[in-house]
Amino acid sequence: MNISKLTKLLGVIGLAIIFCGNIVNAQDATDKNFKDKTKKGFVVIKFTSKWQEKNLDPKILEGIKGHNDCIILTVASEDAKKVVKKLRIRNYPSIALFYNGKKKEVWKADMDGVVEVDSKDIKKAIDDVLAGDVF
C-alpha cells in the first residue's frame, strides 16, 4: 500500500472515530426525559432540527466538555416539541445552559442558523452561575 492510500485510509478511520465518538457520547433528551436529564449539575443542550440552515461548530461544545462537570445533550426539535415551545426556540441550531434543572442562558440562532457564541462565552456563563453573578 502506498503512502497516499495509507494516509487517506487513516484519515477516514480518524473521522469515523470522531463522529462515532460523538454519537456514543451524545445523551439525547426528549419531552419525556428532559427534566430528569437536566436536574443535576450543569447541562448544555444543543437544539437541532432536520431542516436547520447550518451545523453548530463542533469546537464550541468540545471547548466546554467537562468544564465544571458539564454534560452536553442533544435535543432534536421533533422529539421535544414542548421543551422547544417553552424555550421559544425557532431557529436551529440553538444552545441552552441549565443548572440543577433551571434554565440559566439561551443562545439562539439567527435566521441564517448562526449562533453568536463561543466556548469562552459558555464557560463564562457557567462560572457566573457558580459565582452567583447571574442577573
Image (cartoon, helix red, strand yellow):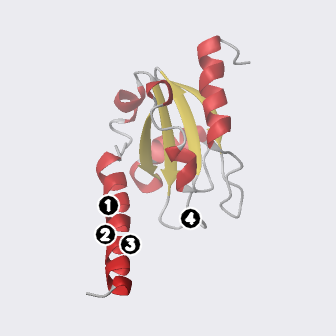
Q: Are marks 1 and 3 in contact (CB under 8 Å)?
A: no
The residue type indicated by label 3 comes to: Gly
105 horizontally vs 16: left or right: right
Rate crowding at label 4 as few (under 14), some (14 to 19) or many (20 or more) other CA atoms within 10 Å: some
Task: Mark 4 vs mark 2: give the one in front.
Answer: 2
Label annotation for residue 17: 1
**Which residue is situated farthest in the top direction here?**
132
Q: Secondary structure at mark 1?
A: helix
* Residue 114 position within the rendered picture, expressed as x and y whole percent measured from the top left: 68, 58
Q: Secondary structure at mark 4?
A: loop
Rate crowding at label 2 as few (under 14), some (14 to 19) or many (20 or more) other CA atoms within 10 Å: few
Label annotation for residue 52: 4
Q: CA distance from mark 2 to mark 1?
A: 6 Å
Q: Residue at x 38, y 85 (%)?
A: 4
The residue where tag 3 is placed is 11
Q: Are marks 2 and 3 in contact (CB under 8 Å)?
A: yes
128 horizontally vs 82: left or right: right
